[in-house]
Amino acid sequence: MRRADAWEARRALREHRIRKGDQAALRAAVKESAHLVAAELNPAPTPAQLRKAVRAHGSLRVQGRHGAEFPLAQEALQLWTDAAEEGDFDLVKGGNRYFRTKEDELPILQHLVEEAHKAGLTQVQLLDAAQVREIMPAATGPFLGAMWSPVDAQCQSEKGTELYTRRAEKAGAQIAFGVKVTKLIESCGRIIGVDTTAGRIQAGAVVVGAGVWTPYLAKTVGLDVPIMPVVMSELETEPVKPLFEQTIRAFGFGSRQRRNGNVVVSAGLNAKVAHGVSLADLNGLRYWLTRAMSFRKNLKVKFDLARTIEQLRHRSTLSTDLIPHVSPEPTCDRKVVHSALGRLSTVIPELQGAKATRYWGGLVDMTPDGLPIIDGHVGPEGLPLITGLAGHGFTLGPVLGEIASDLPLDGATKRDIESFRLARYQGKVDQPEMMI
């Protein structure tokens, strides 16, 4: 299973039969298990398997977001901080820095600062190069300045996932590793359960958070969910001496340094991502064509012949038979991440010569406007959707768990999710300023 298929498949929420005490326990189980990001191993992942399965960069970033996401990111960071009291997952609250390496990047960073201040993050500010070096002495290379936020953090993603796995099981969640959901079951306008490769599970509500596979499951009850899967690439270097504890983002590179000295490198802002073109892209083409043309320099497309043949054989582009039992290993674009490491090494020269020891790619569920889909009132009653997280799912995971328990149990959440409704795609779709 991918991501939250584990909690989709769990027996839960038998409407009108939940006692008050049971409901409290159920709420705890749902909100803890909703953050699980790797659930495709059977019977359960070892630490080594978990490290391979968890693709998240590990940056717990608040700044640099759409205004609608700020409240969720702020609450999520506090929940991460609270969780660190229960277990060590290498949480470091070192802040975040958006480097400016070109003059034309200044207006974008100024806009991000304005958005942060609107959200109450008044400590976010623009610094010149000298001010940056006071905080990060290792940044001795050429750059023009940076946007600085002291509140952001980072952690080791597989350790954080392991902690939430334990918390979910302690709260009573039954996590079904190696089980795939194949169909959502509805009757008389409401969800009554799911079919899985391990049999049918009855449930009064099902929370769908299946990442790039969400459109396939949603289609079984007639829902169209516009998700485009792309692959983001990362690498990790050999251990080097401690150079920075802040997370880094910039146009062309992003990074964080782990406690053990390894440096994790991504392609940063407006990263180049890969997409395998198949017949499935005809679904929602009106959403994607404009965005694909706008960001064609950031989108590396390749015709996926094997996928297309499989779709023709099944006479469907969104049949759940097309969902692999275990997601295939995404191909890492080594050229992109080596270029990112080179750019990072220009700003932090002591990284020059650092050898990459690990590469990986991760499937990212993109939406047409770059915002997530979080909605408790779509399709049959009892079917909340949480998907399209565009690489933000790990950071937002704890608060998404809260929402995942609110929507089926209370029918609403105190968090403002109006901007994330699925219905927004019925009208004119806003185009994001950047691909990622």
Image (cartoon, helix red, strand yellow):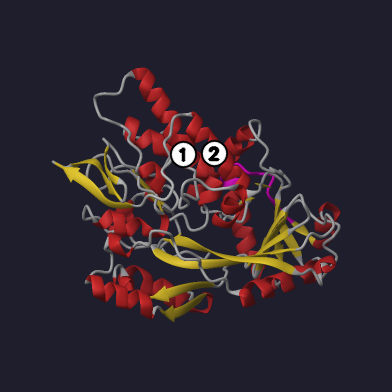
Residue 196 in the figure: left or right of residue 145: left
Of the numbered discs 2 and 1, the one sitting upstream in the chain is 1
Extreme residue in the left direction: 188
Query: Which numbered tag is attached to residue 33?
Result: 1
Residue 375 in the figure: left or right of residue 244: left
Residue 110 coordinates in the image, percent (x, y):
64, 59
Amino acid type assigned to the residue bearing label 2 in the image: Tyr
Q: Residue at left 57%, top 51%? A: 50
Query: Which numbered tag is attached to residue 164?
Result: 2
Amino acid type assigned to the residue bearing label 1 in the image: Ser
Extreme residue in the front direction: 43
Which quadrant would residue 207 be assigned to in this image? top left
Structural distance between the alpha carbons of marks 2 and 1? 7 Å
Residues in magenta, as a range: 117-126
Q: Nearer the viewer, residue 430 or 151?
A: 151
Query: What is the secondary structure assignment of the residue under circle 2?
Result: helix
